[in-house]
Image (cartoon, rainbow, N blue to C red):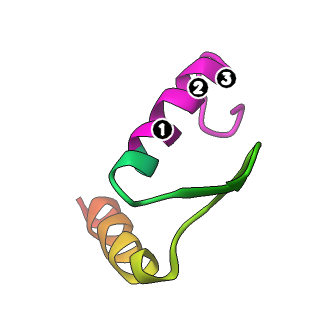
Amino acid sequence: MDELELASTGVAYHHLAALQAGGWATSPRRGSWAIPPSRIIPLLAIITALEKG
């Protein structure tokens, strides 16, 4: 949370829930999040495009 400068755990949960609903993240167990293997390359492409502006 600190690294992402989020105001609260509620904000983090809200964003993670949205990512999970879109298929971009999974929660295999409570308090743990993962990116499905099929989403890793597309996610890296998005991050790279955003960094280049």
Total number of numbered discs in the rendering: 3
Under mark 1, the amino acid is Ala
Q: At 68% from the left edge and 39% from the top edge, which residue is drawn?
A: 3
Callout 2 secondary element: loop
Q: Earlier in the sequence, mark 1 or mark 2?
A: 2
Q: Is residue 24 left or right of residue 25?
A: left
Under mark 3, the amino acid is Thr
- Whether the magenta-drawn stretch holds residue 15 is answered as yes
Residue, far front: 29
Crowd tier of the residue under label 1, counting other residues whose Cα lies within 10 Å: few below 14, some 14–19, many 20 or above: some
Q: At 54% from the left edge and 22% from the top edge, which residue is drawn?
A: 11
Q: Which mark is residue 17?
A: 1
Q: At 60% from the left edge and 37% from the top edge, which residue is drawn?
A: 4
Calculate the distance from the C-alpha at mark 1 to the C-alpha at mark 3: 12 Å
Q: Nearer the observer, disc 1 or disc 2?
A: 1
Q: Nearer the observer, disc 3 or disc 2?
A: 3
Q: Which mark is residue 9?
A: 3
Q: Are marks 1 and 2 in contact (CB under 8 Å)?
A: no
Q: Which residue is mark 2?
A: 6
Measured as percent of width and height from the top left, residue 32 is found at 74, 52
Please give the range of residues in magenta: 1-18
Q: Nearer the observer, disc 1 or disc 3?
A: 1
Calculate the distance from the C-alpha at mark 1 to the C-alpha at mark 2: 15 Å
Image quadrant holding the C terminus, namely bottom left
Give the camera-side residue of 53 and 42. Answer: 42
